[in-house]
Image (spheres, coloured by chain):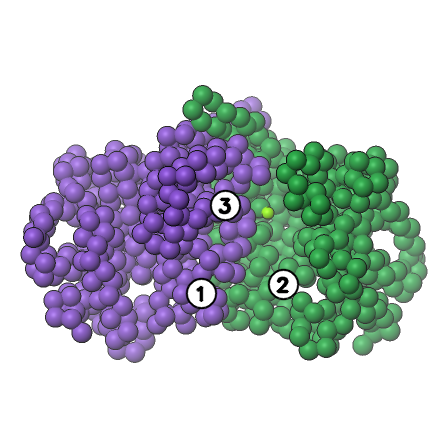
Chain colours: A purple, B green
Amino acid sequence: MGVKKNIGVLPGDGIGPEVTREAVKVLNAIAEKHGHTFEYNYGDVGAIAIDKTGNPLPDETLAVCEASDAFLFGAIGHPKYDNDPSAKVRPEQGLLKLRKSLGLFANVRPVTAYDSLLHMSPLKTERVRGADFVVYRELTGGIYFGEKGRTEDGAYDNCTYSNYEIDRIAHLAFQAAQNRNKKLMLVDKANVLETSRLWRERVTAIAKEYPDVALEAMFVDNAAMQMIQNPKQFDVILTENMFGDIISDEASVIGGSLGLLPSASVGEKSAMFEPIHGSYPQGAGKNIANPLATILSAAMMLDHLGLIDEAIEVRQAVNASLRNGMVTEDLTKENPVGTDRVGDFIANHILEGE
Amino acid sequence: MGVKKNIGVLPGDGIGPEVTREAVKVLNAIAEKHGHTFEYNYGDVGAIAIDKTGNPLPDETLAVCEASDAFLFGAIGHPKYDNDPSAKVRPEQGLLKLRKSLGLFANVRPVTAYDSLLHMSPLKTERVRGADFVVYRELTGGIYFGEKGRTEDGAYDNCTYSNYEIDRIAHLAFQAAQNRNKKLMLVDKANVLETSRLWRERVTAIAKEYPDVALEAMFVDNAAMQMIQNPKQFDVILTENMFGDIISDEASVIGGSLGLLPSASVGEKSAMFEPIHGSYPQGAGKNIANPLATILSAAMMLDHLGLIDEAIEVRQAVNASLRNGMVTEDLTKENPVGTDRVGDFIANHILEGE
Ligand SMILES: [Mg+2]
Ligand SMILES: [Mg+2]
């Protein structure tokens, strides 16, 4: 009963190629065990694409993404462009163009506090232990994309949201809550902003279609406090673009390591899966990069492809690597292993079990 | 060489009267010790003002504030209004009207991690120990006050800032940095927002007038992370209204107790000093409210009135109350003392020393 899936792979810059290689290794283990066929198509993006073609997102790469059932994205960015203020073409334009071309409107960021990493969290252990939630951030609307400009003695940025933009991500968030602990927290500023009041109206109306999900709302300033004081209260967080930028970045540090955080960016037809960490050019080629965030991004991809049990197997294997100290030097000082050996351990764990 | 100052006192609702009473007690100790004359004029605000006059900010109260050199504000809010969605007049309208009538454009929120309270912080001790910074939040502009409304299929909120609005609070923040550790961190989102780019231009230009202050800038999403990971890096934070709302509320929890956090709201002619905690109606009249945030707000008032040494004396006396466990039940389980005895201890410490 194996399935056939077309998977795009955009390794990108810096440590991107190394971490995506390990994720593909893990996907191959899943395919082998379950009799699936994963066909990979590769594309350049970021600095390496500029070097080869002058374009951070060549047409062929976009075609790879459009033709795929889902695609993995490593990381982009290189100092030779990032540190040059006169550079006309920048690696990160590849990512922005990708989001825009494919209409990736929902950014999905799970946060899990792993027991073996609680000592690395900036929060006290008892505050963060057991935290496990996911942030659904709207990615293509709001003030970041509104009309902006200058006046004679000032400047302006306009924030707009349409019913449609709110509804489509709200459904995704409710569906995610149905598959989790059935709690949805809308984060807004409805006591002040009209767009927030619209979010609250639309989301409250849509909640009727998901009677098994408990909807609550929280003001964004309070959410910024609660994320520190009691992150365990959250299950699924749904919020607009700018609030999501702030809250999801705040949330990203409470687990203690950016090296474990996966993400997805979902559109009507395409879905991209990538670690939230950057390209870390200083670490490239040294076999020291932590591949777990990319491997966990591949697990999110498996979920997206409907391969739920397979995603669970990947997460269990990641947990085993953490428990057994089969981790890179960013997570341990005692006997760290290389990027490739983390991937080997996880692939092997999937194929052979504990 | 005593001075004469006219001080407004707006006790408000809930625990407001109790905590402002202790702050006045402490101000009286300062006046007695230094030969100053503080004349107090009282005004009603909030639920108590609605009960008496139907208006959360009666004209007489506004006149008290306008005639004062500075004024203390307790807290407002009462369940009988807050829990009634049909209430036409609400206590918090008193505060909003006060800010607007007096043009209080800068909200100033110091955050100090007190050694004796580090066990209450949600952050690990080594992360938060020594944190000591102040947030300057613009309070009357930006998206909270911009034009807002609905369209056929959506909603909008407009964010605007004028040069003037940015410049006047920037000067306050630079001056604060000169009196502190000479570091100013502008928090914005200049990679995306035009208003943020204007903030950066204006603040960078004004920095030339303060060559002893080191100016840096940080994106708001990064600031939300840094506040958890390394709050010690901050000295003075300057930011626009909404970012300030989120970042200052996030900052308020890292010290472990809202009961110690003072604030000021400063305008061209008036300045208001208030604890950041609320009216806590359940605790009213029980002599259990923590008066330290209001007493520390009175210390900020002394600074504002140019009585710098006196402000230091108040803060030293507050430190002594913390060191000696002369604190209310929110801060200790062992032999807490009442609201009045905390005020007595601090007033006495000022008059008699250790
Ligand atoms: Mg961000
Ligand atoms: Mg707030």
Amino acid of disc 1: Val
The quarter in which the N terminus of chain B is drawn is bottom right
Chain hosting mark 3: A
Q: Which one is closest to the eye, mark 3 or mark 2?
A: 3
Q: Residue at x 9, y 61 (%)?
A: A33
Does A25 appear above or below A178?
Answer: below
**Disc 3 versus disc 2: distance between alpha carbons?**
24 Å
Q: Position of residue B112 (x, y in %)?
A: 63, 62
Does B169 appear above or below B301?
Answer: above
Q: Earlier in the sequence, mark 3 or mark 1?
A: 1
| SS at mark 1 in the image | helix
**Disc 2 versus disc 1: distance between alpha carbons?**
18 Å
Residue picked out by circle 3? A217
Amino acid of disc 3: Ala
- Residue B152 visible from this viewpoint: yes
Mark linked to residue B116 = none
Chain hosting mark 1: A
Does A94 appear above or below A150?
Answer: below
Mark linked to residue A128 = 1
Q: Which one is closest to the eye, mark 3 or mark 1?
A: 3
Q: Residue at x 56, y 61 (%)?
A: B254
| SS at mark 2 in the image | loop
Which of A207 and A163 lies nearest the eye of the viewer? A207
Q: Residue at x 44, y 27 (%)?
A: B154
Q: Position of residue B350 (x, y in %)?
A: 83, 68
The quarter in which the C terminus of chain B is drawn is bottom right
| SS at mark 3 in the image | strand
Q: Is residue B351 left or right of residue B75?
A: right
Mark linked to residue B257 = 2
**Disc 3 versus disc 1: distance between alpha carbons?**
21 Å
